[in-house]
Image (cartoon, helix red, strand yellow):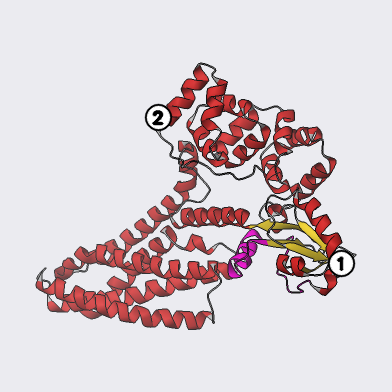
Amino acid sequence: MAEETENIQFELTDDLIKQVENFIEVNDNKGLQKLLKDFHYADIAEILDELNLEEAMYVIKLLDSETTSDILMELDEDNREKVLKNLSSKEIAEEIEELDTDDAADIISELSEERQQEVISHIEDEEHKAEIKELLAYDEDSAGGLMAKELVKVYETWTVAGCLRRIRAQAKEVTRVHSIYVVNKQNKLIGRLSLKDLIVAKSEQKIADIYITSVDSVNVHDGAEDVARVMAKYDLEAIPVVDDNQILLGRITIDDIVDVMKEEAEKDYQLAAGITSDVEADDSIFEHTKARLPWLLIGMLGGIGAASIIEKFTGSMGDFIVLLSFVPLIQATAGNVGVQSSAIVVQGLANDSIDGSIIKRLFKELLLGLVNGLAIAIIAIIISHFLFDTPYNVSITIGIALIAVIVMAALIGTFVPIFLDKRGIDPAVATGPFITTSNDVFGILIYFLIAKLILGF
């Protein structure tokens, strides 16, 4: 990874992009290098995302591999795919040799299997090559798929003096030294070493006498979300990865976990909005249609169901046809309450803060629904009777129906995410269109059943 330096304040402007394009157009390599030399690699990646492919390739070919390897990791995924297609296998290998193993494996995993083998064959550092191949064998959404092999480890049998010498050698290969891990002769993780304790200890002391036995770790097969949860809970900047025998394999750093959290949040947001697959704003119309259409069809079927319920009751309403005017109120209230309840539960499941049994949670929502329903019902009765001149018995019916619908929506919004989570299904699918549509249908059914019971039509 490139060393961090003091960077100028970056602001992507049309003028800056124009300057870069002008330097490229006149082949002013020195001018372009001078312009970009003080920018962070993430800033340069943002500039390249605004250029066309030919211009982006010009800049990448101009800059050194140490910089461009980091730029590749920051590029938009679609743009990175285009850039990689325009680099030879040998050129990609040269870029990868500058990256930490986890980033290198991420880049290679985006290539076809045939191209992966070609790129790996061009990597000259045999140890780096072997470590990348090891990481590629793990599921990308597991701790093994996230970890980097670069870390600083010491053996419990080393002396402090010997430890310091070896740490200096290891640290050259590690971008940031977050922790020093202690292992035994079998390479099993047994603790961690405080830098302060190491510095103040006597040279002849053994590491076994000064290391800290308490150390958090994750299994190489743990899911990415589980790793994120552990690191967030204990405020860790890095966490070691071990196998089933407690052998130290690598470490995961906070920057990788931030990416996991971001991707998971984006996925959940799309699911909650009724988008069934990962799509970007610039994806094709076909991709967007494929992602959105299933939920739109569910919503359409829900609407047809609600319409059929209304049609069934309409013929017998007689003088109470005014009830139809309040159907949007019932549907909107049911949908909103359901989404609110499910969103709270999904959030609680995501951060592991949902305690107690389902019955306890449902009882709480029942009480909450009754309180909210009563408040909304009173307001609805007053408005419908005095502002819309609705008959008193009809206004009371609307109020009672609202209480029942709100309680129903709260219970469905709470139960469904918990049920899905216990079945191993992402609870985020419970929010948005699913909850809204189901509550619309059940809300209308309850509304007219209560109206028929009270008004007798």
In percent of the image, x 20 and y 73: which residue is there? 380
Numbered circles on residues, count? 2
Residue type, label 2:
Asp
Above or below, 398 against 20 in this view is below
Task: Name the residue beneath numbered marker 1.
Answer: 184
Q: Position of residue 162 (x, y in %)?
A: 86, 60
Q: CA distance from mark 1 to mark 2?
A: 58 Å
The residue carrying pointer 2 sits among few (fewer than 14), some (14 to 19) or many (20 or more) residues within 10 Å by Cα, namely: few
Residue 422, how many percent across, how many down? 59, 70
In the image, 96 versus 195, the foreground residue is: 195
Can residue 315 be seen here?
Answer: no
Residue wearing tag 2: 15
- Secondary structure of the residue carrying tag 2 is helix
Asked if residue 180 can be seen in this view, the reply is yes
- Measured as percent of width and height from the top left, residue 191 is found at 77, 70
Is 352 positioned to the left or the right of 444 in the image? Answer: right
Asked if residue 236 is among those painted magenta in the image, a careful observer would answer: yes
Q: Is residue 319 above or below residue 293?
A: below
Circle 1 residues within 10 Å: few <14, some 14–19, many ≥20? some
Residue found at x 71% / y 67%: 196
| Left or right relative to 172: residue 50 | left
Q: Which residues are magenta?
A: 211-238
Q: Is residue 421 magenta?
A: no
**Mark 2 or mark 1, which is nearer the start of the sequence?**
2
